Image: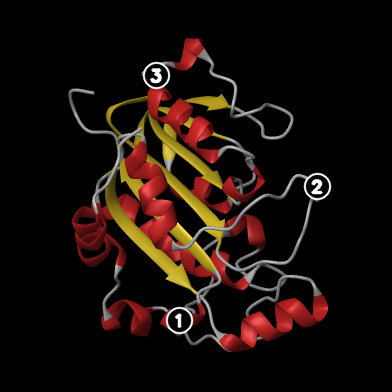
Amino acid sequence: MKQFTEEELKEIYEKHVKLSPEYFKKHQFLPNCPVKAWNYSWKTHDMPRNFAILDFIEWTKKYNIKTGNCLGLTCAVDPELEFIKYENHHYIKYPPCDLHIYLSQLENKLDFFVFNQTIDHLYNPFIAIENLYKYIKPGGYLFTTTPTVNVPHMTPIHYNQYNLMGLSILMMSVGFEIVEVGQWGNYDYICKLFKDHKWPDAYEVGHENQEKNVVQSWILVRKPHGN
């Protein structure tokens, strides 16, 4: 496990984690929903996932990772999967499969691994992310979303929340390089979430992305070549 000095942590924050004012302006207004499986509607879907999907579409185009050979996934209905096309799939359904258990048959097999809303349900995320790192080919990518603020759910299998800095350090600790990070949240969403104990959609809360009221974070990382 990689260790970090205080200076390294500050550099990571400034270089990879601190988002520009332009980023927050970009994610204040939702365009038309591009998700076919959702009947092209944001209705009934957790508000921050909408912006995560938009970043995912943008990033997979930017880094030309829309297509490839082997894709790993934990949820066959993740909306992000609609926007990429891979020839082969390794479906590690979680649950019941335990990401803490190493699957040697997947070592260096995957070009891309996509899993969402899962890290908060891992009792030891470091072990699970280390396993995923081993499954991905050198030069391959991983994308995930995770709550930063949430209500208890799926208890007792609910252990943690991550902000962007914590998520970035988790990924870098096992060897990943940070490629892109994103976040969304606002006070309106937080109040509604804790009042109703359910996830508000785009029609229930305002769309403004407030930097200090983050409720969900997401990240795209890469396994370095030669590892």
Query: Is disc 3 in contact with disc 1, using a CB cutoff of under 8 Å?
Result: no
Residue 182 figure quarter: bottom left
Residue behind mark 1? 212
Q: Nearer the viewer, residue 110 or 183?
A: 183
Mark 1 Cα-neighbour bin, 10 Å: few <14, some 14–19, many ≥20: few
- Residue bearing the label numbered 2: 156
- In front here: 162 or 216? 162
Mark 3 vs mark 1, foreground winner is 1
Q: Provide the secondary structure element on which disc 3 rests.
A: loop
Q: Earlier in the sequence, mark 3 or mark 1?
A: 3
The span from disc 2 to disc 1 (Cα, nearest Å) is 28 Å
Q: CA distance from mark 3 to mark 1?
A: 38 Å
Q: Position of residue 177 (x, y in %)?
A: 26, 43
Q: Quadrant of residue 134?
A: top left
Compared to residue 136, the image places residue 148 above or below, namely: below
Q: Which residue is mark 3?
A: 109
Q: Is residue 220 left or right of residue 156?
A: left
Which one is nearer the viewer's eye here, 205 or 7?
7
